[in-house]
């Protein structure tokens, strides 16, 4: 094969050159014939002889000279193109002679690795897929679905939630809402146990065991295994922004599926009522504790004020000091009148008059009484008529005790108001379960979704097979 190919190439090149030469020669020989024919035609035209006779001199010679020049130019161009074509052909032949000749590929045949790949495809993809399709369409039992939707509403915060809209979801909520609690409760072991006690889930969902072992549960399943199976038959959809909860339960008959969703709604209502009772009990307990604390504080404030009055024998220091200020004002007026009377007597009588001495004595007595009264305000000497403590300290202590009593009274009134509010809240239900989709009753089975499951199985089996084949061949090539 290596020797035949260059010979064939040389033969085709020779034929190509021969064809180009013959075509060039033909083209060169055609031109004189065409000029002879044109000359004959020109001679046959009427009047051609006369014209030829008339111009037999310079015209004929010039025409022949021009034809010779044109044919010379065309010949030179053809020779140039022929030389270039020969050079290109020679160069092509040289390149072809130097290029190695590759052998012709043999026909493709199946090898052992190809049969192994096909066998792995059959074992890893086709056989499991056929078994899955057979199980889904021939063995698996039909399942009916029932849907229920509800949410937790509050009488106190519904208006605020409507006004704020979704701002709470952007700001974030640190405490778990009642809907979050209910969402977790539906998936809990307590809910599964409550529904099991009502409907006997084991007997219903194990009736096709072990025939339909994929979608059934074994009769001797424990409570923990039942909780695992509960996640398969009760599907929950929860929107944390709006608080809407949607539950879908499946069963081997439509009545059982509806009974499961109805039991979930009823148990959720019971849990919401329990949360209400607990909230009311906590509110009442906290309100009563606050009221008892406020009452004890008010008693202590009043008792301290009573001890102050007993110790100082003053009911109201402010009223007492106002009375003493009244006495001082009266003494000041009497002193002013006595001084006026003394001045009048001093201008009319002699210095040794008895009336003048009495007026002077009266002035001295009034002044002494004023000094004594002034000392009682800032002295703790009981000899001067004081109460044993200075009045500024008494007034400060009395004001402090009065403020404590007033604050204790306000706290007590607030605690009474909170207790009454807690009682009003306890009298009504603040939380309730609002059902916006009642448990539905299915007319035809929806599960298992055989086409979807078959397609997913085929997809994953092909992916697993392809990845396994790539890993195997990569390891084989490296080894």
Image (cartoon, rainbow, N blue to C red):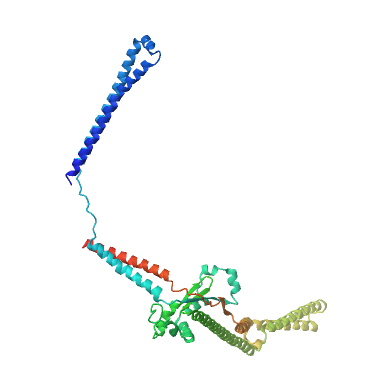
Residue 224 visible? The answer is yes
Residue 93 percent coordinates (x, y): 21, 38
Looking at the picture, tell me which residue is in the foreground, 396 or 450.
450
What residue lies at 23% left-to-right and 36% top-to-bottom?
Answer: 15
Q: Which residue is drawn at 35% across and 20% down?
A: 38
Q: Give the image quarter of residue 61.
A: top left
Task: Place residue 157 in its image quadrant.
Answer: bottom right
Q: Quadrant of residue 395?
A: bottom right
> Horizontally, is 277 left or right of 363 in the view?
left
Q: Work out whether residue 398 can be spotted.
A: no
Q: Is residue 256 above or below residue 79?
A: below
Q: Which one is in front, 17 or 221?
A: 17
What residue is at 48 percent from the left and 84 percent from the top?
195
Q: Residue at x 31, y 16 (%)?
A: 65
Q: Which residue ends up furthest to the bottom in the rendered image?
A: 310
Residue 442: x, y in percent? 51, 76
Q: In this view, does 355 lie to the left or right of 444?
A: right
Give above or below for 62 relative to 89.
above
Q: Observer-nearest residue: 309 or 69?
A: 69
Count of labels in the image: 0
In the image shown, does 156 or 324 lie closer to the viewer? Answer: 156
- Classify residue 373 as left or right of residue 277: right
Residue 312: percent from left, percent from top = 64, 88
Residue 62 to residue 260: above or below = above
Please, which residue is most extreme toward the left here?
3
């Amino acid at each position: 094969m290596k020797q035949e190919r260059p010979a064939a190439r040389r033969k085709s090149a020779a034929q190509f050159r021969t064809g180009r030469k013959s075509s060039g020669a033909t083209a060169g020989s055609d031109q004189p014939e065409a000029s002879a024919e044109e000359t004959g035609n020109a001679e046959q035209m009427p009047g051609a002889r006369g014209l030829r006779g008339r111009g037999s001199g310079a015209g004929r010679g010039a025409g022949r000279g021009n034809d010779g020049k044109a044919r010379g130019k065309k010949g030179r161009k053809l020779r140039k193109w022929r030389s270039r074509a020969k050079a290109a052909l020679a160069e092509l032949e040289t390149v072809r002679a130097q290029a190695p000749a590759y052998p012709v590929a043999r026909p493709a045949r199946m090898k052992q690795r190809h049969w192994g790949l096909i066998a792995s495809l059959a074992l890893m993809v086709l056989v499991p897929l056929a078994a899955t399709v057979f199980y889904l369409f021939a063995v698996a039992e039909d399942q009916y679905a029932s849907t229920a939707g509800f949410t937790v509403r509050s009488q106190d915060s519904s208006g605020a939630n409507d006004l704020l809209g979704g701002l709470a979801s952007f700001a974030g909520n640190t405490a778990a809402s009642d809907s979050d609690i209910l969402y977790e409760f539906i998936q809990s072991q307590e809910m599964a146990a409550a529904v099991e006690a009502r409907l006997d889930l084991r007997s219903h969902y194990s009736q096709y065991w072990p025939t339909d072992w994929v979608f059934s549960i074994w009769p001797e399943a424990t409570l923990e295994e039942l909780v695992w199976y509960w996640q398969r038959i009760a599907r929950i959809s929860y929107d944390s922004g709006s608080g809407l909860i949607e539950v879908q339960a499946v069963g081997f008959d439509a009545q059982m599926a509806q009974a499961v969703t109805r039991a979930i709604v009823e148990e959720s209502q019971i849990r919401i009522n329990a949360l209400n009772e607990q909230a009311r009990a906590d509110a009442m307990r906290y309100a009563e504790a606050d009221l008892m604390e406020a009452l004890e504080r008010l008693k202590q404030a009043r008792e301290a004020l009573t001890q102050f009055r007993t110790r100082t024998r003053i009911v109201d220091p402010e009223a007492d000091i106002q009375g003493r200020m009244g006495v001082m004002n009266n003494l000041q007026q009497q002193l002013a009148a006595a001084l006026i009377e003394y001045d009048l007597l001093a201008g009319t009588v002699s210095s040794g008059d008895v009336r003048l001495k009495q007026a002077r004595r009266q002035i001295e007595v009034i002044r002494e009484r004023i000094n004594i009264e002034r000392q009682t305000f800032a002295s703790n000497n009981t000899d001067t008529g004081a109460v044993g403590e200075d009045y500024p300290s008494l007034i400060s202590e009395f004001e402090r005790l009065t403020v404590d009593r007033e604050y204790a009274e306000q706290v007590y009134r607030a605690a009474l108001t909170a207790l009454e509010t807690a009682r009003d809240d306890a009298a009504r239900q603040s939380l309730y379960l609002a059902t916006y989709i009642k448990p539905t009753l299915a007319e035809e089975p929806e599960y298992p979704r055989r086409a979807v499951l078959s397609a997913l199985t085929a997809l994953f089996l092909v992916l697993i097979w392809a990845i396994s084949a790539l890993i195997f061949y990569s390891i084989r090539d490296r080894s």
